[in-house]
Image: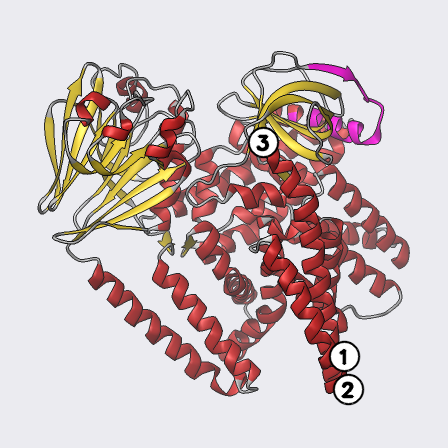
Amino acid sequence: MKRPLCTLGFTFVASALLASFLSCYVMKLIIIILTVLAIPGFFCLKGDKRKIFILCMLSGILAVSMFYIKTEFEYNKVVTLDGKSTTVTGKVYDLSVSENGTYKYFLHADKLESYNVPKFDVIIYSNEDLEFDYYDTVQVYASFYKPAYSYGFDSVRYYSGENIFILGYTDGVGAYVTDTNHKSIMYLIKDTNRYLKNILDDMFEADIASVIKAIVLGDTDNVSFNLKYDYLSSGTYHVFAISGFHIAVISEFLMFLFSLFRLNRKFSFIITLAVIYGFTVFSGMHIATVRAAIMLTITLVGKMFYQKSDSLNSLSVSALIICFANIYNIMSLSFILTFASSLGIILFSKKIFNFLADKFYDKSVLLKIIFEVFSMTISTSICLLPVYIFSFGYISIVSFIANFIIYFTATPIIVMSFLLIVFILLSGPKFIIAPLGKVLSLFVKAQNNFMSILSDFKHATIGLNYDYIKLWLLISVLIFAVLLLAGRGRRYIKKAAVICILIFIIMSAAYNQSMRQSAQMYILGDGTASNIVLLTEKSVTVISAYDDSYIDSQTLSFLRSKGINEIDNLIYTCTKLRNIDDNYNLVDNIKVNCILYNKNNTDIFDALNRTNVSYVLNKIDDCTVKIGDNMSLRFFYINTKISGEINLFDKTINLSNNTDRLLDIKSDITLIYDNADYKNISGIPSDTVIMLTSPYIQNDSENDFIKGYENTLCFLIKERQDILIK
């Protein structure tokens, strides 16, 4: 039996990943079914087939059982706190401050007043500085709530992957420190990390400091939205996540130094591993870093005893260790990204490189580097394609060029950042630190500028968030799976690839035909507010009814996932502009032709005029905006608030916060925003009533409307046809 660890590891990961989408009842059924199937399989199969079958069954049963136990006895009990308010006692293990001034405190909760739940981790949000420090034992009165889904971001899975099942909010009343623990090793590590962040902030500009902190300290909290978006659009955001690339660069650099001093081979390996594990702990023990450290350990230990390590076995072992530490790590996007990309490199990178080298043989070093970058980019993209489709919704088509640039910039940046941190910790001489910092600054600034230029290309990304693309991916996987199981994969792989391409072309053409003479209206919620996106054949219109701190950024991600690179009309109906940065995030990163705003909003003109982007900026008067054939928007004022009527073919959609007006008007869909009066909602003559913003006061009227702020809704509207709700 070849590679039993691979069979064990990959079956375990696949089973745990499947279990993460299932209910406890279904998980129990699967455990019973697998147990029942294992008994006849043991007696009917012989030799290696029996070993493989039993190993797969046991691995699957173990993975699903671990996930079931974690869900039933931890997750399901902790989420019962949703909507409850009580005093929690716990230890602060991390803290941060977001750009909009919100404080986040990460607690290991030990004790909960009035509720019997197991120990759990929680993030407590506050608009006030509670003056908590790392590893303080604190007591705080908080209101708990489950993470809310927002478009393109499954926050429940995201937080669960971080072992956080519930969130909390406090106004700071009744929050105080009961004990401090400032002498522990972990506190010293966190405090040193904080000290280095402050030093780097003083030494460099904000964007440069944020890149260095992300690369060597694992801190991405201060990466600005524009910078983050530049790297995401260019397909190089992996540079910010400390992973195998960073570990490989640092370990190779250390081995090179040790070779110069002719240190003993085994001693060099031991010192390298010690430094790498210290770096892993110091940078926050992120999953990608832990995975890389484990694989490096297996490789170097093998070399110490003159044994060749197997990359697939190493990957399997690291997956098992991480999942056994916490089975919910399987839901972490970081876990999926690091293992999928590593698997792609192991399976395809060398083959693609050899194919290119055979076809275009040349002794040119530059050509060899191009082949290496291309093979790495393509091999990772193959395994990451499902992640791009289901998690991000788009893929960068400039990633090859961007990663080619990263090949020459990231390695020296990582090495210089690592050396700079070491010299700062050792209180090195300024005549070394100062020039090193200047050179490092030049490299980071150049890299940032290159990524910004590439991300500014109109079609730098391709939108993948379409149902037919997801269906096509499923069909393609099934085709190749059938060929592999039939043992004919290599023989028919080219024909299968051609068939998959033809299927994609046919499905794409059918989808485009079905969308002709239609309009789509999306309600994009982020938990507290929602935006309206209208897509027609001739225009893209975004209506922002509330000034929320994240909703415009969420809308930008949605537009990218649909392959939209230009907004024709951006309409702000809010009367105040509080979260200016979020508005900048939208208009700075996508072309906007015309912005219309509430004439009572005195801040928005000055705020948006400060951007370097050109667009038409007008106040909304009583007017009509044409967005397509037989499609228009009409706006008018009731006091200071804007009401509107959206006409799409023969359908009418009303937008208002004045429920008295809405009671007198019949419409197909009614959109209510800005904490309107709830008393008469049940009497609105509309087929569908949607609340765009979270109400300040909860009451029984919630049963009379759809919570648009907590959902992503899609309405397909065609002439003389019923509205289709997805």
Residue 533 sits in which quadrant? top left
Q: CA distance from mark 1 to mark 3?
A: 45 Å
Check disc 1 and report the residue beneath it: 51
- Front residue of 719 and 409: 719
Check disc 2 and report the residue beneath it: 47
The range drawn in magenta is 176-197
The kind of residue on which mark 2 rests is Gly
Q: The N terminus lies in which quarter of the figure?
A: bottom right
- Residue 616, image x and y in percent? 19, 30
Is residue 9 at least partly visible in the picture?
Answer: no
Q: How packed is label 2: few (under 14 Cα within 10 Å), some, or many (20 or more)?
A: few
Judge whether 114 appears above or below 459 on screen. Answer: above
Helix, strand or loop at label 3? It is strand
Mark 1 or mark 3, earlier in chain: 1
Q: Is residue 258 left or right of residue 76?
A: right
- Residue 81, image x and y in percent? 61, 31
Mark 3 or mark 2, earlier in chain: 2
Q: Are marks 2 and 1 in contact (CB under 8 Å)?
A: yes
Q: CA distance from mark 3 to mark 2?
A: 51 Å
Helix, strand or loop at label 2? It is helix
Check disc 3 and report the residue beneath it: 167
Q: Is residue 302 left or right of residue 442?
A: right
Is residue 649 at least partly visible in the picture?
Answer: yes
Q: Is residue 22 left or right of residue 464?
A: right
- Residue 453, image x and y in percent? 39, 44
Residue drawn at x 51%, y 82% is 483
